Amino acid sequence: MHFVVMGGGPAGNQAASQAARLGVQVTLVEDEVIGGAAHLRDCIPSKTMIATGGALSAMRRMPGMGLADARAQLDLEALATRVQMIETRLASAVTELLTRQGVRLIRGQARFVEPHVVVADTAEGPVRLEADAILIATGSRPRVPSWAEPDGDRVLTTRDAYPPKELPSHVAVIGSGVTGVEFVHMFTSLGSEVTLVVSRQHVLPNKDPEVAAALEDTFLARGVRLLKGARAVGIARTPEGVRVACDDGRTVEASHAVLAVGSVPNTDRLNLPAAGVETDASGFIPVNHHCQTNVAHIYAAGDVSGTLLLSSVASMQGRKIAEHIAIGHTIAHRHLNYARAPSAVFTEPEIADVGIAEAEAFAEGRKVRVTKVPFASTARALIDNDTRGFVKIISDPATGVVLGGSIVGHSAAELISVIALAVTAELRVADIVESMFVHPALVEALAEAAE
Ligand SMILES: Cc1cc2nc3c(=O)[nH]c(=O)nc-3n(C[C@H](O)[C@H](O)[C@H](O)COP(=O)(O)OP(=O)(O)OC[C@H]3O[C@@H](n4cnc5c(N)ncnc54)[C@H](O)[C@@H]3O)c2cc1C
């Protein structure tokens, strides 16, 4: 069995690693860096910058902790070095693991020539690879609307925005989904003025409105200008920077603009017709619950499959595909339930959710029990001088089974794991109540919400 993987991001490298562990012969073709855009351009650099912004914000709260003189100077050069160091360390760790597992790594661009044949175009020439199973894990790139021309200088996609050579004085962020609000948070905490162009009436349109409102309150308190109900339709360069035009006639003058308006799949250079693989109208590759495309031995995972554009989901899809290839559909092989995937928004306050949301249950007319506890009621939040946010648990009133939850506040991305585990394992709120938690810890809010 020879398994060829196209793309070395979370989906590709996890599939390769797990398949090798299960005894499959694996070749992975990557045209840039093993670890993928996730390590090099998206998750890791953005979260590293946000961590520095978070450290600065924490210093601003120091006076409330009995520390009188807490000042810090942002050093962009040191920050850029730090981003690079973390990226390199993570990419090397994955590369070393795959090499140790015996995965053949080829640096090149993969494309199909036949349903069972992939060619990797390398610096030394084409390498022909015959495969029994193939995974397309080539990821996605930022969507550029027809009215914008990113120049890498003032008009930026999310991938040009870091590490910044200079701190923008005023950034217009276009797009108020997860990526857009993370950029707002990153730039405000580093010290830039920010205007957010919000096409709807509130940020994070796919999240619980109460959660979105909590984030908007913080943005407003930090001086972010929210331009609601405005759809950007043009960006022009000006002597001072950029001018963003909106469909309602409003304009934003800023030093820089960042486009955070979604992603397009990297499927255009794969020669998919040679393999008979179909895409949808946007170029994403539809897959079934085993991540198989319309051609049974060809799988697609990660962003290219258009399911949930998250690194964590891509990794899990990759592992599941490896199991499916190596051991088939056994009892041990449970396929992914995307409704149970937790996600986080790395803003301040942090936001995380999993499973069903209160508004969603309400819209479906489904009876649910909702319990909400503010972090302000925990000792730990008072000690940490950060009492913002709350925990919300959604459960089935008849059985007590945990159906979902949302957390707004410090460490939400870590704390959601408890609710995510409960949702996946179909635990009841009583199981959370029966568990013992550390004191003083933020997780106590969660235990209280389960009461
Ligand atoms: C700004 C930003 C922040 C994000 N933050 C988070 C986060 O905090 N948490 C989270 O879970 N998700 C986050 N995401 C989403 C996450 O980055 C993606 O879901 C994840 O990278 C998808 O992994 P992947 O394996 O599908 O693709 P990628 O990570 O994009 O990897 C695909 C790889 O394939 C390679 N490739 C492409 N074409 C070819 C070819 N023809 N031949 C060979 N190789 C090829 C590419 O070079 C790339 O290395 C973020 C996204 C953005 C834009």
Image (tube, rainbow, N blue to C red):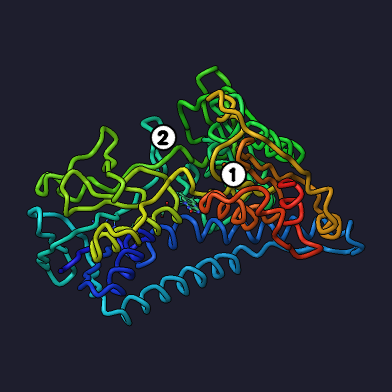
Q: Is residue 428 left or right of residue 61?
A: left
Q: Position of residue 266 (x, y in %)?
A: 29, 48
Residue shown at 73% from the left, 44% from the top: 390
View extreme (left): residue: 114
Amino acid type shown at disc 2 = Ala
- Residues 191 and 372: in front is 372
> Pointer 2: residues within 10 angstroms few (<14), some, or many (20+)?
some
Residue shown at 63% from the left, 46% from the top: 351
Residue shown at 46% from the left, 25% from the top: 233
Q: Is residue 375 left or right of residue 290?
A: right
Q: Ligand 1: which quarter?
A: bottom left
> Pointer 1: residues within 10 angstroms few (<14), some, or many (20+)?
many
Camera sees residue 31: yes
Camera sees residue 239: no
Circle 2 — which element?
loop
Q: Position of residue 442 (x, y in %)?
A: 75, 57
Q: How many marks?
A: 2
> Residues under labels 2 and 1: Cα distance?
47 Å
Q: Position of residue 87 (x, y in %)?
A: 47, 68
Amino acid type shown at disc 1 = Val
Q: Is residue 284 above or below residue 17?
A: above
Q: Which residue is mark 2?
A: 148
Q: Which residue is mark 1?
A: 401
